[in-house]
Amino acid sequence: MYICICHGVTDTQIEAAIDNGSTSMKQLSNELKVGSQCGKCCQCTKRVLNRKLVQIAVQELEVA
Ligand code: FES
């Protein structure tokens, strides 16, 4: 699903960037340019970021 229309960025691309080490909106913006034009995708991007970070944390707890 497209999250950022201005730059054609999908939730899958955002999740991949997080898997590759991005942990903040600033890092996602630098890497994918999300939120750098009209800014309307910021809330949605934050939701994807938070969901993915929680998912990673839960996976790490299950491994430990
Ligand atoms: S929709 Fe992402 S900057 Fe406009």
Image (cartoon, grey):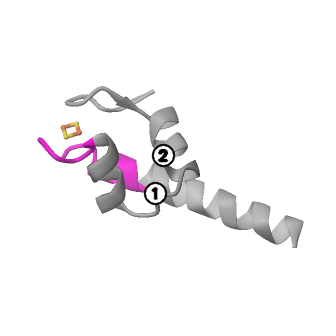
Give x and y (percent) for residue 48. Answer: 48, 49
Q: Is residue 49 left or right of residue 35?
A: right
- Quick one: 20 or 62, which is closer to the camera? 20
In reply to whether residue 64 is colored magenta, the answer given is no
Residue 39: x percent and y percent? 17, 47
Dot 2: element? helix
Q: Residue at x 48, y 46 (%)?
A: 17
Observer-nearest of 63 and 5: 63
How many callouts does the rendering have?
2
Nearest the viewer among 43 and 52 is 52
Instruction: Please state the horizontal and vertical placement of residue 54, each as a whole percent of the image.
Output: 62, 63
Q: Which residues are magenta?
A: 33-46
Q: Nearer the viewer, residue 26 or 39?
A: 26
Q: From the top left corner, tell me how far across and down residue 9 is, in percent.
A: 35, 31
Q: Point out the quarter of the image occupied by ligand 1.
A: top left
At label 2, which amino acid type do we have?
A: Ala
Q: Which residue is mark 1?
A: 22
Asked if the residues shown at circle 1 and circle 2 are in contact, with their CB atoms under 8 angstroms apart, the answer is: yes
Query: Eyeballing the image, is 63 above or below 7?
Result: below
Name the residue at 56% across, 55% down. Answer: 51
Q: Secondary structure at mark 1?
A: loop
User: What's the magenta bit mostly, secondary-structure-wise?
Assistant: loop
Q: Relative to residue 25, is residue 51 drawn left or right?
A: right
Which amino acid is tagged 1? Ser
Q: Residues within 10 Å of mark 2 (few under 14, many from 20)?
A: some
Query: Residue placed farthest to the left in the image?
Result: 38
**Quadrant housing residue 24:** bottom left
Kindly identify which residue carries mark 2: 17
Is disc 1 surrounded by few (<14), some (14 to 19) or many (20+) residues within 10 Å? some
Q: CA distance from mark 1 to mark 2?
A: 6 Å
